[in-house]
Amino acid sequence: MYDIYIEEFNLSNSLEIEHFLSPFEIELEDDVEHTLVARIEGKIVGTCSSSGNIIKSIAVRCTCGNTGIGSKLVTQMMNHLFDRGIYDVFVFTKKTNTEIFKELGFREIVSSDKVVLMENGRIGIDEYVKKMFVKSGLGNGRKASIVMNCNPVTRGHLNLIRKASEENNEVVVFIVEEDKSIFSFETRIDLVRKCTKELKNVHVISGGRYIISSNTFPAYFLREEEKSSQYMEIDLQVFGKYIGPVFNIDKRYVGSEPYCNMTQSYNEGMKKILPEQGMEIIVVERHAINGIAISASMVRKKIREDRTEDIKDLVCNEVYIYLASKEAEETIKRIKESDFLH
Amino acid sequence: MKILKPAKAGTLESSDIYITVYPNDGEGINIKLESIVMKQFGSQIKKVITETLGELDVENVDVVAVDKGALDCTIKARVEAAVRRSSL
């Protein structure tokens, strides 16, 4: 019996680990914060990494047989995360690893044909979504839905919301909660609420941790070209399987996407996956002014170029007021300094 | 004893049990158990956890237990360690 050593891996020298991972067709992602390796006689025999509350890039050399290397690695990783106050852990892994993680106390949320998303938190997705629904105060009637980031909300977003509002009894607008956009989540949702307050059948709520969050939508281990389609599928499966039934959603509205490839293929994925869960997809032509479709990135571009007057045509009055306020100074500074994707 | 913060004890290795305890707001004792010997020993494991919590005067706690075939004495030790860590 060999001795197995588990140790932290210094990511500044990632060549050794990449070499180990390549036969598994797994990559070490850029957002990995912490990596553990298991060694026998100095050689790497297994590894796993973490990014936020997600464990990924997991591989164990199979010639080591049933030596429990995987469970040792995952235990240590969970301890590491626990000590940093991360108690609810998700794992993104190949579908073939599902059983291994079940034995380690994880539950399957959804899977695509290649990958599976699992969780081990105290509150599972079922309970979480039910709580979300109760908190929203919504009734049991049929609803249309829209998922938006709104960074910041534009007349284009409002046009889409208005159309859904006209065509349905009730509309739920989920705002992406993940704070990875230039405008903070609080600001984004607040501005959407202000701009839609006239529309009485529109309810604006937080998307929570299962709608386009880094849990359901991470950049993970599959090779680039496959990557986006796989994680989009996971995100959409979660929406169709868990969010839709609890909120009684039968439609999802979406704006056509002339600019961003990722959003475009997300829309394509939507048309494929959500109807399988009994949801109708309604694509609304993106709102255009003088033939140019409005987007939030256009608004940010104008801010960057100090052309605040032009913004008036792109956003509703509440957003314009906000941008002129003292509160917005920090945000505007951030916009000028960087170029975020979404 | 009062559960003040999340704490854990144990490992996911064979013959051990991984116990995590979390505070809750006066909701009593809730145990979520997963075990490789659920059918044969599920209720016995829960009993040992509940008794150990009783001995430590813990009234409100969420327990998540992932069992790998631990003996009663192991379960007891892991529960006690987790509770003591959480009340530090």
Image (cartoon, grey):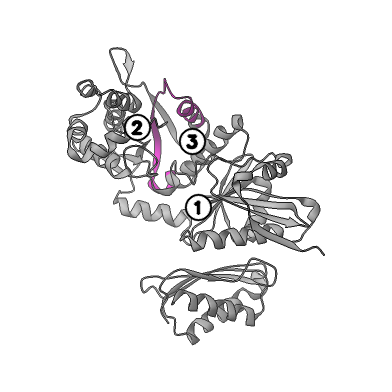
- The chain carrying label 1 is A
Residue at mark 1: A53
Residue extending furthest toward the bottom? B55
Q: Give the range drawn in magenta.
A: A244-269
Secondary structure, mark 2, is: helix
Secondary structure, mark 3, is: helix
- Seen at 66% across and 41% down, the residue is A26
- The chain carrying label 3 is A
Residue B22, numbered label: none
Q: Measured along the vertical axis of the image, is residue B15 above or below residue A57?
A: below
Check disc 1: other Cα within 10 Å, few if <14, some if 14-19, many if 20+.
some
Residue A225 location, quadrant: top right
Between circles 2 and 1, the one closer to the viewer is: 2
Looking at the rendered structure, the kind of residue marked 1 is Asn
Residue at mark 3: A274
Looking at the rendered structure, the kind of residue marked 2 is Glu
Q: Where is residue A298 in the image (x, y as percent from the top left)?
A: 33, 23
